[in-house]
Amino acid sequence: MTKIISYAVIVLLVGFGFSWLADRPGVLSIVWQGQLIEMSLMVAASILGGLIATIMIVWWLFNTVWNSPRAAKRYFRARKRDRGYQALSTGLIAAGAGNAILARKMTARTQGLLSADQEPLIHLLEAQADLIEGKYDAARRKFEAMAQDPETRELGLRGLYMEARRQGANEAALEYAEDAARNAPYLPWAAQATLESKSRNGEWDDAIRLLDQQKAAGVIDRGEAERLKAVLLTAKAEEKFESDPKAAREDAKQALKLSKDLVPAALVAARSYLREDNLRKAASVLEPVWKNAPHPQVAQLYVRARSGDTATDRLKRAERLESLKPNNVESLIAVAQAALDAKEFGRARAKAEAAARMEPRESIFLLMADIEEAETGDQGRIRHWMAQALRAPRDHAWVADGIVSEKWLPASPVTGRLDAFEWKMPFGHVEGPIEEMSVDQALSSLPDLAKPEIREKIIEVPVAVRETPVAPVQSPVKDDPSMGAKKAIVEPASTVKDQQRAAQKTPEPVPFFGGLPDDPGVKKANAEPDEKTRLKLF
């Protein structure tokens, strides 16, 4: 476009010049070798222009002929280079598609057409062909050679990093990534791997510094960078909470400025204030987070902020959370639990039922079972709510890459990815409960309250037994043939009375284990061993 405009301007200027000369006619006289030459000024200008054009054409022809061998050489060289780049492009595409035969063929053709010193991509094509053919050692040597060249250093380190990851040499892979990130923090793969490594080792300050470099280089978005920095600050605060609560609180507050809904940061800051018995500031930290993202751990810490509070005081604090976030499941559960502790069973039951209608899940039905046990103690109704809990969806938990953790962690223990844990339902229960259910059906099928069982108890009253006089017992009369008469033989009365007393006498109790404890200093009367005792002795 610039050349066209320049050409048009030159033509206009020449035309303007000739027009100016035509408006001002004159005669030009030249005396050369005794001869007078006269002509008009317009003819002289035309001859001069033609002469200049002729000189330029002659010079162009001379220059073309003079430089034709070099031009021909340059033409064939460019053609050869174009063919080489075409072969290189075809080889790279074949390597990406996994065609080892074509990739190796194009590699040989590229090497014949291009010089490896002029085109570093030839080394990459060779390394890719070796990888496809399974020649990993040869490919690693190619990448090492590329890492020594300043022009292909980053590409070589990338190849070495990928090969180390493939072989499971994580430490070597991290070394390559750190080497690349040290000189080029703008490389996403190197910075991400180094960031995960430093996070896994607890080097929070270095990780934050590297993240700031990534943000300045524009590798990562501002919002994502602030979120990851908040996660790193929270992890740093949790690590030094026990040794330096004030410094941990400052880091946690800075994390909350970057990410207002980061629950672990709010918990660390609130616990730090509670150690100083500053309940007001702890509440000022927890309440904004509760408004943005209600969480059961926030509710538990807020309600039980002081150990000396009564159950009524905890109920009031739970009501405060409900006023901040009304019509929320977590608010209803917090009030129901506090009402149960305060023995307000009707209110606890109403809040628990409302929470179950809003989002039925396991912990709510277990809470209703606790309410039933504390209020009625009816085992049938308790078992009913326990059965509902078994069929209900599971509670939310900290989940990352299929791992369920009891507490929040800054990075995934599987992949090392930062900010991987989310508060959600575990993966195995996402599809829903075992059996479809509704709270209204559970309430309608609730067993009636059992009536208290009245048991009869028989009380034995000892009655005194009076002795009844017994008449003398006469023996039967026997016939004595020698006397010829009947004679009554009567037993003595004292003998009969002795027999009655022996019959009425209470037997002496026998110990359960077969006898009184043995005392070596006391001898028993008639201590003659029976048959079983003799067998034991011998």
Image (cartoon, rainbow, N blue to C red):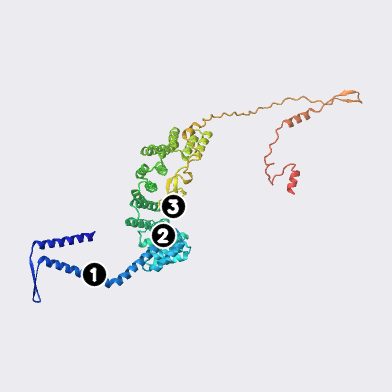
First-in-chain label (1 vs 3): 1
* Secondary structure category for the residue under label 3: loop
In this view, which residue lies farthest toward the top?
485
Within 10 Å of disc 3 (Cα), the crowding (few <14, some 14-19, many 20+) is many
Label 1 or label 2, whichever lies nearer to me, is 1
Q: Is residue 66 left or right of residue 52?
A: right
Residue 207 image point, x, y percent: 38, 56
Q: Residue at x 78, y 30 (%)?
A: 495
| Mark 1 → mark 2, Cα distance in angstroms | 44 Å
Left or right: residue 450 versus residue 505 is left
For marks 3 and 2 on the same chain, the one whose residue lies earlier in the sequence: 2
Instruction: Give 418 or 353, whichever is nearer the viewer.
Output: 418
Cα separation, mark 1 vs mark 3, equals: 72 Å
Q: Which residue is mark 2?
A: 93
User: Could you tell which of marks 1 and 2 lies nearer the N-terminus?
Assistant: 1
Of labels 3 and 2, the one closer to you: 2
Quadrant where the N terminus sits is: bottom left
* One can see residue 122 in this view: yes
Q: For mark 1, what is the residue?
A: 60
Q: Quadrant of residue 174?
A: bottom left
Q: Which mark is residue 412?
A: 3
- Which amino acid lies under the numbered mark 1 shown in the image of this protein? Trp
- Nearer to us in this view, 383 or 167: 167
Three-letter code, disc 2: Ile
